[in-house]
Amino acid sequence: MMIGPPTMPANYFFLVQRIVTERKYFDTSRSEVVRQLEGKGEADIDTEHVTTDDYSSQHAVILRLNIHCKHPSYAEGWTIALKLHNTRIDGFDWEPKILGDRQCRACRLASACLGSQA
């Protein structure tokens, strides 16, 4: 039997509820995200996030923010995912709602807003 320092947990999924509700900071700019989206239709941003468990022990975890958009110049639909260990733990998606031959007003406005930020 080997005696030594305690080992780190293999995963941090027991912290997901806490991580999702905490504020997180990704050191990037909107122009960098747009640059990545225009280049390959996706942006990947990593950050180290420190959180505390129920026993007041601190844990540093690497979080990844994945943003996918097929047509970044005219947001036809996109996905934003917060990932821990390459597994989605939070996020949201958007796709336009088509009413006959027309988009709904909210979708037109969202497309216009996203297009003006590029």
Image (cartoon, rainbow, N blue to C red):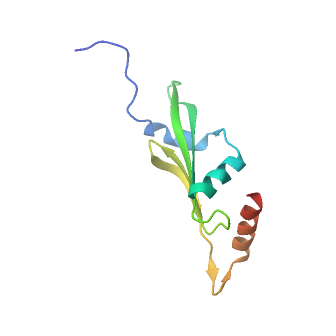
Residue that sits furthest to the top in the current view: 3
Instruction: Left or right? Give the position of 23 relative to 18.
Output: right
Residue visible at 75% across and 58% down in the picture: 117
Farthest residue toward the bottom?
100
Residue 82 percent across, percent down from the top left: 54, 48
Q: How many marks?
A: 0
- The residue at 37%/14% (across/down) is 5
Residue visible at 63% across and 87% down? 100
Q: Position of residue 114 (x, y in %)?
A: 72, 62
Q: Quadrant of the C terminus?
A: bottom right
Q: Position of residue 48 (x, y in %)?
A: 56, 33
Assign the N terminus to one quadrant of the image: top left
Determine the image quadrant of residue 93: bottom right
Front residue of 7/46: it is 46
Vertically, is 54 above or below 107? above
Nearer the observer, 114 or 19: 114
Q: Nearer the viewer, residue 59 or 115?
A: 115
Q: In the rendered view, would you say 106 is above or below 15?
A: below
**Outermost front residue:** 39
Q: Residue, x 66% and y 38% (percent of image)? A: 27
Name, please, the residue furthest toward the left. Answer: 1
31 in relation to 69, above or below = above
Residue 56 to residue 108: above or below = above
On the image, which quarter does residue 111 sit in? bottom right
Q: Position of residue 76 (x, y in %)?
A: 62, 69
